Amino acid sequence: MSRSLVRTLIPLAALLGVASLVQSAVAGSATTVSGSSVTGVRVVRETAATSVGSTTFEDLPEASTTVKVPEGTRALILARFSAESLCLGPAGTPEVCSVRILIGGQEAEPASGSDFAFDSSNGGADGPYSWESHSMDRSRGPLGPGTYTVKVQAKVTLVGGAFGLDDWSLTVERVRV
Ligand SMILES: [Ca+2]
């Protein structure tokens, strides 16, 4: 970020009360994991659009695969999901649309649930042509031997909202620890 941009953003952040939001994010507890080599990759691709209207997380159809961690080994499982996305609230109201990735039935890290906005309706300003490109990275582990299902789930916040996902890709990697 350039110094001139920082000089512009700092007064703007103070004006908008954004500084307190930044502080709360900094005060968290980041975790670090590491591994050595990637020992397996699976990619699921889809060009057909899906619409999600549920206010609780539901499976994104077909966005699922499995990873086996062999006996005698431990692994990190990395999952990356990218998609074309459209998030609309009922009758132009503000809407937030969330995605989470489950690995072995547990939300992968960072596990923010509904707090993670994959997309929003831009305060209700987005319309039916407001398709955008968004993505997320998640991980779990180190994990012991077993077969782990990796799947993507999505939800809207408001009843009557609509969350479109299209042209998505789910990339899952197994990394030796
Ligand atoms: Ca949007």
Image (cartoon, rainbow, N blue to C red):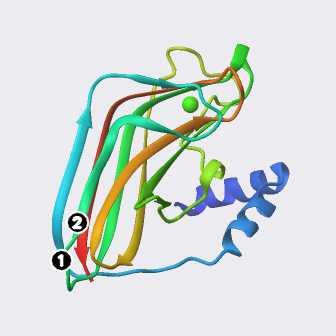
- Which residue shows up at 31% across the image and 22% down it? 48
Note whether 83 is above or below 124 in the view shown.
below
Q: Which residue is mark 1?
A: 37
Note whether 35 is above or below 135 in the view shown.
below
Question: In x, y percent, where is residue 89?
Answer: 67, 23
134 to the left or right of 87: left
Q: Residues within 10 Å of mark 2 (few under 14, many from 20)?
A: some
- Which residue shows up at 33% across the image and 64% down it? 78
Question: In x, y percent, where is residue 97?
Answer: 59, 36
The CA distance from mark 1 to mark 2 is 15 Å
51 to the left or right of 168: right
Which structural element holds mark 2? strand
- Which residue shows up at 34% across the image and 56% down it? 149
Residue 144's image quarter? bottom left
Q: Amino acid at mark 2?
A: Lys
Residue 19's image quarter? bottom right
Question: In x, y percent, where is residue 30?
Answer: 57, 76
